Amino acid sequence: MQQKMTESSTKTTVESMREWVVEHKLRTVGCLWLSGVAGSIAYNWSQPAMKTSVKIIHARLHAQALTLAALAGAAVVEYYDHKTGAKADRYAKFLPTDAYSHKD
């Protein structure tokens, strides 16, 4: 237990954030979408020459582009996890290893 505490305390903030994003990919994409909509609406509302409907449409388009970029990033992380075997190691503790052995 003490060794686990020291390992987690030596992790940097970036490593901790990366682990959280890997564990919560869809939540991360949803938060990015929501922040994209809010930021785009805030920016568009500062543009007085546009109608309200155009501002909302632009906010949706900006958020959609940000969401596609976030989904592409999540796909890259998923691919990297499969390629390095990190995902298999993470879920190996939940699968019994002897239950699926083949007997000749």
Image (spheres, grey):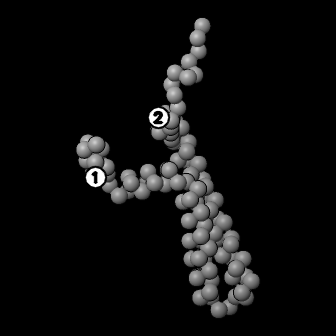
Residue identified by numbered label 1:
9
Across and down, in percent, residue 104 comes to 60, 7
Q: Is residue 73 visible?
A: no
Residue type at mark 1 is Ser
Tag 2: Cα neighbours inside 10 Å, few (<14), some, or many (≥20)? few
Front position in the image: 2 or 68: 2
Residue drawn at (73%, 82%) of the image: 54
Residue drawn at (52%, 47%) of the image: 77
Front position in the image: 34 or 44: 34
Q: Which quarter of the rendering shows the N terminus?
A: top left
Across and down, in percent, residue 47 comes to 62, 88
Above or below 78: residue 18: below
Front position in the image: 101 or 28: 101
Q: Give the secondary structure at mark 1.
A: helix
Choose the circle earlier in sequence order: 1 or 2.
1
Q: Is residue 93 visible?
A: yes
User: Toward which corner of the image does residue 71 lie, by quadrant?
Assistant: bottom right
The extreme bottom residue here reads 48
Above or below 94: residue 77: below
Front position in the image: 48 or 16: 16
Residue drawn at (56%, 18%) of the image: 101
The extreme top residue here reads 104
Tag 1: Cα neighbours inside 10 Å, few (<14), some, or many (≥20)? few
Q: Give the secondary structure at mark 2.
A: loop
Across and down, in percent, residue 13 comes to 35, 58
